[in-house]
Amino acid sequence: QVQLVESGGGLVQSGGSLRLSCGASGFSLAGYAIGWFRQVPGKEREGVSCISGSGGSTDFADSVKGRFTISRDNARNTVYLQMSSLKPEDTAVYYCATERRRWACSIFSHNYDTWGQGTQVTVSS
């Protein structure tokens, strides 16, 4: 069964850090661009960051640039989103998704087609 699973969410104080993981079962993430998205109830889903299948290209939303980093470990079949200097406005459910794209990625792409179930991130002020 092809599945993406996010983990690492939780409650953290403003200014703190969390590392989210996106793991895959049933298939290899190698060759897939991975995007991280977040959504707050009542608001549209927002692209946060992505990393190309090669790992050589990344993209970040302006709201998280300089605070979030993204990386991948194909040996572990996992992509990580390191979130630092967290703010209350980062509170959301975070999802990862795949797009078959090796050399580039975009958080604005509409071609992400396999999604995880999400992990809640709550940043208290």
Image: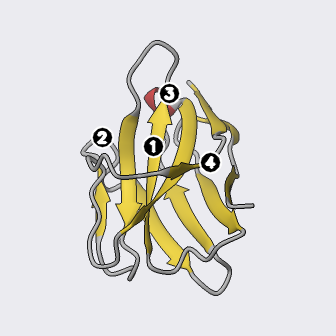
Q: Nearer the viewer, mark 4 or mark 1?
A: 4
State the CA–CA distance, disc 3 to disc 4.
23 Å
Marks 3 & 4, CB-CB < 8 Å contact? no
Look at the picture and state if 98 lies above or below 12. Answer: below
Residue at the disc numbered 1: 37
State the CA–CA distance, disc 1 to disc 3.
16 Å
- Crowd band around label 3 with a 10 angstrom C-alpha radius: few (<14), some (14–19), many (20+): some
The amino acid at mark 3 is Pro
- Crowd band around label 2 with a 10 angstrom C-alpha radius: few (<14), some (14–19), many (20+): few
Q: Is residue 87 visible?
A: no
Helix, strand or loop at mark 2: loop
Quadrant hosting residue 16: top right
For residue 63, which numbered disc appears in the image?
A: 2
Taking depth in this image into account, of 109 and 10 the one nearest to the observer is: 109
Q: Residue at (31%, 51%) from the top-left corner?
A: 107
- Crowd band around label 1 with a 10 angstrom C-alpha radius: few (<14), some (14–19), many (20+): many
Quadrant hosting residue 63: top left
State the CA–CA distance, disc 4 to disc 1.
10 Å
Q: Is residue 101 left or right of residue 37?
A: left
Q: Residue furthest top?
A: 42
